[in-house]
Amino acid sequence: MSLDCTTEGLLSAERLLTLAQLSHLLPQRPHPSTIYRWITRGIRGNRLNSYKIGNQRVVTLADAEAFFAACSTQGSSSQTPCDAAHAHGRAVSPRTTRQCHRRALKALDDRGV
């Protein structure tokens, strides 16, 4: 994604927040490293969009609101950790694979298959 930092671009249209500033705006005040983890790893397949300006990572208030809305709407999802990892091309640990396999066998057994 290209970032337009001209006066007509992102800087004039959006409020940019550092990770520490965003932390202070949120209830429970998560540590900035937690917010960085939301950027790099995400939550339930959703990643917080960010921009790197110089040596500092910043987010827009609109991106943060969209991230939290996406995370809250997926809170009731029945997607297993295996499904989520495969959908995003991530590796799954052997332990998680065994747990998912047991759940799938139980679901089939419950349905009489």
Image (cartoon, rainbow, N blue to C red):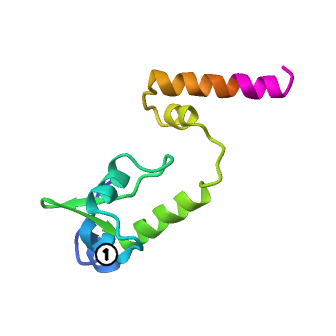
Residue 4 visible in image: no
**Residue extending furthest toward the left:** 55
Q: Can residue 82 be seen in this view?
A: yes
Residue 76 x %, y %: 65, 53
The quadrant holding residue 74 is: bottom right
Give x and y (percent) for residue 27.
42, 74
Mark 1 crowdedness (10 Å alpha carbons): few <14, some 14-19, many ≥20: few
Q: Mark 1 points at which residue?
A: 24
* Rendered location of residue 45, percent (x, y): 49, 46
Which SS type dominates the magenta stretch?
helix
Q: Does the magenta stretch include residue 47?
A: no
Apparent side of residue 10 relative to residue 106 in the rendered image (left or right): left
107 vs 64, left or right, is right
Q: Which residue is drawn at 47% across and 51% down?
A: 46
The quadrant of the picture occupied by the C terminus is top right
- Residue type pointed to by label 1: His
Residues in magenta? 105-113
Write down the quadrant of residue 48 in the picture: bottom left
In the rendered image, the vertical position of residue 106 relative to residue 46, given as above or below: above
Q: Position of residue 18 (x, y in %)?
A: 24, 69
Residue at 34% x, 78% y is 13
Q: Return the residue nearer the eye: 10 or 69.
A: 69
Residue at horizontal 29 percent and vertical 62 percent from the top: 31
> Relative to 29, does residue 57 appear above or below in the rendering?
above
Check disc 1 and report its element: helix, strand or loop: helix
State how many labels appear.
1
Q: Is residue 105 placed above or below 76 in the rendered structure?
A: above
Give the residue at the far right of this rendering.
112
Residue 111 highlighted magenta (yes or no): yes
- At x 49%, y 34%, the residue is 85
